[in-house]
Image (spheres, helix red, strand yellow):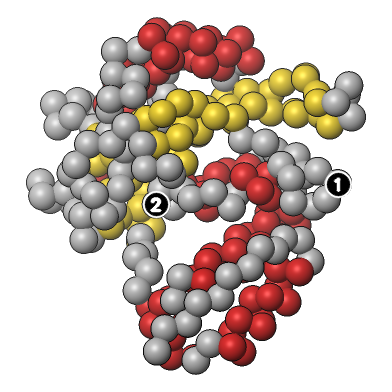
Amino acid sequence: MRWCVVFFAHGPCLQALVVWCENLLPNHVSGQKQSSMATSNKVELAEALALGPAWRHFSYVMLYAPTPRALFGGRIPLRYAVLMHMRFDGRLGFPGGFVNDQCPSLEDGLNQELLNKLGEGVSTFSVVHTDYRNSFTDAKSKVVVHFYVKCLTLEQLQAVEARAPLAKDYGLEVGPAWYLLPLPSRVFGLVRVPLYTLHDGVGGLPAFLENSFIGTTREQLLDALQDLEILDPQTVSVLKKRIAQHKQLLGLIGT
């Protein structure tokens, strides 16, 4: 028997509805759904680089810059501008690409991909080894992804946004999709991450995080924002709990 539960909820009602759905659906249904979810494994950089020739390396970067601007006449300070992009499949990710085997380093390959995808706006900076944060592997697709974080000036970030539509491969290049590799994917455009939460407790970053993200990028985004002290640990913990509830809710609806 298949179950279908359809409703719309946000804020404090979300947790109660998740519990209600868990009681409504048979235990084996939600368990089966959870066990089918794909996972990625975090690895040290040296271990990732030692993987054999059957593996492909994909590097991407979170570009961010401090900004003095604010919304609604100064009532909501933006503090930082953080860039992600919308992919062809409706998922959010970070700009980057597969590293050419001929590149001497992951960073060289990433900088070349950024130039191809984002254009001359990236010519004022380079991603370097000290910008590296972590790596994840996916055994099924034989892909290892490497995550970097780069702080720019606001002028540099705005130049990236302005010149990206003129880039050679803008809208034509690839992004990692565990279920589609090695088919090409397309980037639809850059977006800024809203780092604030509106008074309703949903608008802003909480609502943004309910979008679909590719791979581990949502978790990497939150961890980076915490490590950079852009968000405090308590806020990140609340957001992660909300994400887990949202995923569980979607899983129950889809059974």
Q: Is residue 28 above or below residue 186?
A: below
Q: Residues within 10 Å of mark 1 (few under 14, many from 20)?
A: few
Foreground residue, 108 or 80? Answer: 80
Q: Residues within 10 Å of mark 2 (few under 14, many from 20)?
A: many
Q: Which tag, 1 or 2, sits closer to the chain's start? A: 1
Q: Which residue is mark 1?
A: 199
Q: Position of residue 198 (x, y in %)?
A: 81, 43
Foreground residue, 253 or 175? Answer: 253
Residue 59 in view, yes or no = no
Q: Position of residue 53 (x, y in %)?
A: 10, 46
Residue type at mark 2: give it.
Gly
Foreground residue, 88 or 182? Answer: 88
Left of 127 or right of it: where is 210? right
Which residue lies at the image location 29% right of the left edge and 13% below the top edge? Answer: 168
Q: Position of residue 218 (x, y in %)?
A: 52, 49
Q: Is residue 19 above or below residue 47?
A: below
Residue extending furthest left? 53
Q: Quadrant of the N terminus?
A: bottom left
- Secondary element at tag 1: loop
Which residue lies at the image location 43% right of the left edge and 15% below the top edge? Answer: 164
Q: Which residue is mark 2?
A: 215
Q: Is residue 252 above or below residue 198?
A: below
Residue type at mark 1: give it.
His
Residue 80 - label: none
Q: Is residue 236 above or below residue 2?
A: above
Mark 1–mark 2 Cα distance, whole angstroms, equals 30 Å
Which residue lies at the image location 75% right of the left edge and 29% below the top edge? Answer: 78
**Which circle, 1 or 2, is nearer the viewer?**
1
Residue 57 in view, yes or no = yes
Q: Quadrant of the C terminus?
A: bottom left
